[in-house]
Image: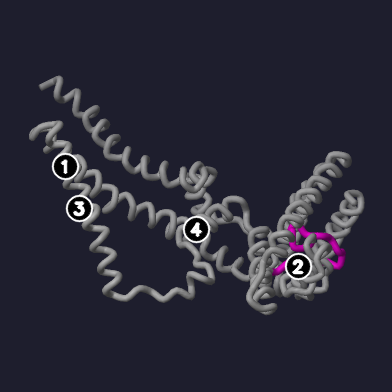
């Protein structure tokens, strides 16, 4: 299989080069720009299949890609088979939604997936059963909040009494002030900043990209004549599941794969280039680089590290102030 893939990759390279030679023959600014874009598409094609000059090593890379995607396809097939709805139409709808999610996931980079899933997890999603539950009435809502406040208040009063009896008046006052300051600091400052950072700021860095990827069917690709399986698991699912092949996203992926999707190259080249080789602009890359250490951590660790970092800012400010004021104090 790998040797055949290598032939197909080279055939697609030839298509891009042929198109580039046509653009170069135009001898104008638009033609020269098109040549640059087509060469970048060729570089992306080689990277997509982990091209290296060493033939045996490239064969091993392609085999690894095929094994990885086939494993993913088998996992996704079991997941799709487990999806059941109340009716056949509902089952088909849920399967199609999951297929779109799989395709969108394959189009995103690892960093983009981290941000996307972190944002959606924080916002939360409701299951079908939860969506059918009516919201509570005003009286029940107020009663629930009153119960929560009463329980927390009683616990706090009891804790203050126990602490004051152990510490005495002086130490109890210090402890009480410390608790009030830390509670206010966390719930009034740190927690809102954390929500704004993870739920608004990070997703805003990739807002346009996520909006484009919301519907993978709109994604444009170069209309190759050479059929070549994509890196997307959907192409492998189409090979082992006829229902996926007949779905809208399956037809889209296979159409892109075989060149059935007719696209006017010259009119759509900018869009094709953007959808194929998109990278964030310099400002976005800078911000993503600053928070890269957070994105590689589990979700719970991200929140903990972010909160502790904000708590260390007042400490750092105090220590640095004392450090710079110390020479003046010694002189005095």
Residue sitting nearer the eye, 48 or 332: 48
Find disc 3 in the rendering and name its residue.
Answer: 153
Contact (Cβ within 8 Å) of mark 1 with mark 4:
no
**Residue 253, labelled with which disc?**
2
- Mark 3 or mark 4: whose residue is earlier in sequence: 4
Q: CA distance from mark 1 to mark 4?
A: 37 Å
Secondary structure category for the residue under label 3 = helix
- Looking at the image, the residue that sits furthest to the left is 169
Checking the image for residue 19, the label placed there is none
Percent of width and height locating residue 332: 10, 22
Image position of 163 (left or right of 117): left
Disc 1: which residue: 160
Element at badge 2?
helix
Disc number lying in front (1 or 2): 1
Tell me the CA gap for discs 3 and 2.
58 Å
- Residue 25 appears anywhere in the view: no
From this viewpoint, is residue 120 visible? yes
How far apart marks 3 and 1 lie (CA) works out to: 11 Å
- Which of the numbered marks, if any, corresponds to residue 121? 4
Identify the residue shown where x is 69% and y is 60%. 79
State the CA–CA distance, disc 3 to disc 4.
31 Å
Q: Is residue 25 left or right of residue 156?
A: right
């Amino acid at each position: 299989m790998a040797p055949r893939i290598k032939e197909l990759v080279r055939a697609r390279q030839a298509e891009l080069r042929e198109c580039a030679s046509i653009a170069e023959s135009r001898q104008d600014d638009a033609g020269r720009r098109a040549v640059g874009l087509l060469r970048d598409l060729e570089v992306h094609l080689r990277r997509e299949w982990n091209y290296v000059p060493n033939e045996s090593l490239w064969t091993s890379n392609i085999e690894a890609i095929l094994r990885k995607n086939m494993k993913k396809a088998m996992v996704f097939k079991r997941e799709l088979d487990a999806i059941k709805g109340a009716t056949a139409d509902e089952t088909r709808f849920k399967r199609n939604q999951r297929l779109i999610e799989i395709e969108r996931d394959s189009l995103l980079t690892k960093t983009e997936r981290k941000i996307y899933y972190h944002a959606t997890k924080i916002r939360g999603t409701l299951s079908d059963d939860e969506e059918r539950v009516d919201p509570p009435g005003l009286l029940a809502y107020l009663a629930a909040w009153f119960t929560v406040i009463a329980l927390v208040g009683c616990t706090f009063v009891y804790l203050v009494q126990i602490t004051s009896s152990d510490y005495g008046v002086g130490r109890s006052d210090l402890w009480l002030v410390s608790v009030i300051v830390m509670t206010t600091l966390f719930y009034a400052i740190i927690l809102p900043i954390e929500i704004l950072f993870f739920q608004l700021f990070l997703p805003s860095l990739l807002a346009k990209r996520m909006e484009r990827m919301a519907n993978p069917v709109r994604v444009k690709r170069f209309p190759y004549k050479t059929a070549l399986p994509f890196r997307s698991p959907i192409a492998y699912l189409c090979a082992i599941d006829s229902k996926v092949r007949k779905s809208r996203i399956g037809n889209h992926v296979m159409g892109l794969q075989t060149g059935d999707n007719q696209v006017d190259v010259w009119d759509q080249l900018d869009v094709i280039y953007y959808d194929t080789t998109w990278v964030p602009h310099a400002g976005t890359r800078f911000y993503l680089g600053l928070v890269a250490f957070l994105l590689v951590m589990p979700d719970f660790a991200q929140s903990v590290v972010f909160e502790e970092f904000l708590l260390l800012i007042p400490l750092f400010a105090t220590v640095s102030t004392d450090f710079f004021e110390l020479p003046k104090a010694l002189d005095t």
